[in-house]
Every structure is written in structure tokens, then in C-alpha cells.
Amino acid sequence: MESTLVVKQATDFKRGIQSGISIAIGYMPVALTFGLIAKTTGLALGETVMMSMLVFAGAAQYISLSLLAQGIGIFEVILTTFIVNIRHFLMSASLNEKAEEDSVGARMGYSFGITDETFSVAATREGTVNARYMFGLNLTAYSSWVVFSGLGFLIGAGLPQTLQESMSVALYAMFVGLLVPSMKSNVKVVFLAALAAAFNSIFTMAELMSTGWAIVLATLLSAILVEAVETFKKGRGTETDE
């Protein structure tokens, strides 16, 4: 009986690794680019790898690089990345409904590795998921992100200085690449981006606050306004149906 349980646990872990391979491959170019831009931003190799190890969030790490390059304070950086990643509360709550009963420690362990991609794979998998499967899935994705972040930094260190400096443009290109697909599929994202840009421009040009706080407040205000309008429209639609 005990040997059967051990075999099942090993099988679940192996299936998690197999499910994570496609994510690991997809992370390679993004992590390489992050490492390369981190080098041009002024981070050291240890700092670059440590950020990927502790944060493990692509969009948040790119935003952090942009804010650090502007000399924005650490508190504003942390608050901005928290706002960007607040969706993880919803993803974790949703995945909890699909997860088997595991210890609190095990759930806390694999919850660290939940990203948009690992959540999608786990959420669309038939049946339930358990800690062994999630650890296998997350470990594969996590290893790829951390290793290729470091490799990207080393590749960037070998480039000519002029080319390294010009690579800062790639940071903005990455943001555009992340934003445009969402704008095509969801009109709400267009209004969200436009409002955030408008608020940030107003706060910055009027010199009402520092750049960091302007970004934080612009993000919050645009999100609140867009969601308020969306809620109002749904309420009106319900009243019309009645």
C-alpha cells in the first residue's frame, strides 16, 4: 500500500514536469531578454538572478526595471508591482477549488510558483491537481525562468557597450508586445491603458508628485474608473432586461 502511494506521488510529480516543459520553452526568449535588459539597466548578475528567483513574475520584473532605470524609490516599485500582480489573489482562489486536500505548508510552497501560464495549465487540466503535480509544473517553469535570466545577462555582458546601451529600447518594445494582444481581444484594456497614460501625464507635467507615485496613482485611478463604468453598464443592462 505504501509503495503504491510512493509510485503515485512520483507519477504526479513527473506529469507536472511534463506539463511544464512547454511553459519552460516559452519562457526562454522572454527570460533571456529580461536578463539582457537587466544588464543594460545596471543590475549585477547576482541581482538579476535573485530578482528572478524571488519575484518570478515577468511583467512585474520588466516594470521594476523601468522604474529602477528612472531612479524611482523602492517603496513605489514594490507597490506598483503589487498592483500589477494583484490578479494572483483571484487565480489562487480559483485554483484552490480544483486542488486536492494538501497540507497548508505544501499549498504555500506551490502557490509561490503560480503564474499566468502555470495557472492556465493547472486550471484546464482534467480532474483535480495536487501538491506533487504543482511542484513538478512550477519547478520546470521556475528553473527555465531563473536559468535563462542569468544567461541573458551573460549574453548582454558580451555585447559591445554601444549595443548594450541601445537595448534599453527593447524594454518599451516588450511593454508594447505585452499590451497590444490584450488590446486586440478586450476593448476595456484600451481604455485602461489610455486612462493610465493620461493620468500619469497629468500628474507628471503638473509636478504634483514624484514619478513613482504618479505611476502608482495613475494605475489605481484608471483601474477603479474602468471597473466602475463596467459595473454601471452591467447594472443598467440588468435593469433593461427586467
Image: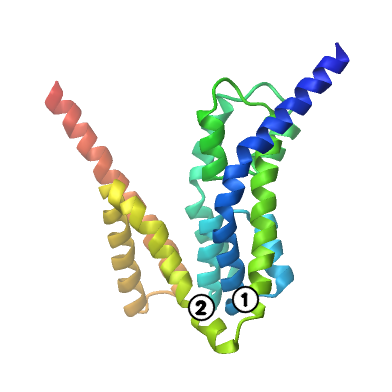
Image quarter where the C terminus lies is: top left
Q: Residue at x 73, y 31 (%)?
A: 13
Up the image or down, 96 lies above or below 85; here it is above
Determine contact: label 2, label 1, CB under 8 Å: yes
- Quadrant in which residue 119 is drawn: top right
| Cα gap from disc 2 to disc 1, whole angstroms | 9 Å
Disc 1 residue type?
Gly
Left or right, residue 78 beside residue 212: right
- Quadrant in which residue 77 is drawn: bottom right
Q: Position of residue 12 (x, y in %)?
A: 71, 27
Q: Residue furthest bottom?
A: 162
Left or right, residue 132 beside residue 224: right
Q: Is residue 237 visible?
A: yes
- Which class describes the residues within 10 Å of circle 2: few (<14), some (14-19), or many (20+)? many
Q: Residue at x 58, y 28 (%)?
A: 96
Q: Position of residue 229 (x, y in %)?
A: 24, 45
Up the image or down, 209 lies above or below 232; here it is below
Disc 2 residue type?
Met
On the image, numbered disc 2 is attached to which residue?
A: 167
Q: Residue at x 46, y 68 (%)?
A: 213
**Residue 156's mark?**
1
Q: Secondary structure at mark 1?
A: helix
Q: Secondary structure at mark 2?
A: loop
